[in-house]
Image (cartoon, grey):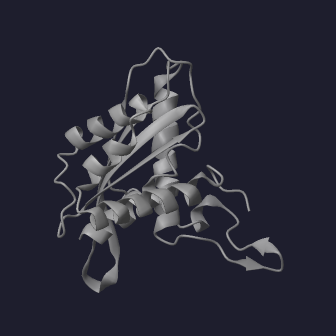
Amino acid sequence: GIWRGGAHGINAFFTESFMDELARMAGVEPLSFRMQMLGGQPRLARCLTTVTALGDWDGGAPGSTQGLATHSAFGSHIALLVEAQVGDGGQIAVDRIIAVVDAGRLIHPDIVLQQIESGILWGIAAALGSATGFSGGLADARNFDTLGLPRLATTPEIRIELIESNEAPGGVSGLGVAPVAPAIANALFAA
């Protein structure tokens, strides 16, 4: 079916989870490993260094609850720092998400914030298994209330910072979805 952000979510999950695995196999801290790969992407590198500063990145060492993920799409760039853990009963709890976005010159910053925040919520739903089934060729979820989206009581603290830029405006409608699942997975892997 139609999914916000299209194939970017799948691709980001693969590349960003694999990036953490490679960093650990190389014995290099995940932020440093990623930065070595971003020589030709200064805008994404700035997002990554800013999000780790804002989120008090602890290095993602074993036992940490922090994970990183980045993604570029639609002419825009995003980096996420997520704090997540497996709670009692095996439930995954996402405690905090910090996003830093470079979407070029911002025409309507408030709309950009809304698009990123709502994308993050869709990403949380996808990562934590909130999906619809199908019966008779139709989706079982018939409205937003049956999609299993995070509710206010279960939504983590979300902080979004927009980087000022004079670059051409980029798209943001699906940008926030893609890095959420890999950042959660990387946090759980570190934990």
Q: Is residue 88 above or below residue 54?
A: below
Could you say which is closer to the camera, residue 160 or residue 151?
A: 160
**Residue 90 percent across, percent down from the top left:** 32, 83
Q: Measuring 61% from the left and 59% from the top, which residue is drawn there?
A: 144
Which residue in the rendered view is the most extreme toward the front?
26
Q: Measuring 58% from the left and 44% from the top, which residue is drawn there?
A: 174
Q: Quadrant of residue 7?
A: bottom right
Which residue in the rendered view is the most extreme toward the bottom?
89
Q: Is residue 171 above or below residue 151?
A: above
Q: Is residue 125 above or below residue 32?
A: below
Q: Quadrant of residue 67?
A: bottom left
Say if residue 140 shows up in the picture.
yes
- Quarter of the image with the C terminus is bottom left
Say if residue 154 shows up in the picture.
no
**Residue 1 percent across, percent down from the top left:** 74, 62
**Residue 92 percent across, percent down from the top left:** 34, 73
**Residue 38 percent across, percent down from the top left:** 39, 39
Q: Measuring 39% from the left and 35% from the top, which residue is drawn there?
A: 39
Left of 36 or right of it: where is 16?
A: right
Left of 62 or right of it: where is 116?
A: right
Which residue in the rendered view is the most extreme toward the right?
136
Which residue in the rendered view is the most extreme toward the top?
166
Could you say which is closer to the camera, residue 109 or residue 179?
A: 179
Q: Measuring 52% from the left and 33% from the top, which residue is drawn there?
A: 76
Q: Quadrant of residue 84?
A: bottom left
Left of 103 or right of it: where is 83?
A: left
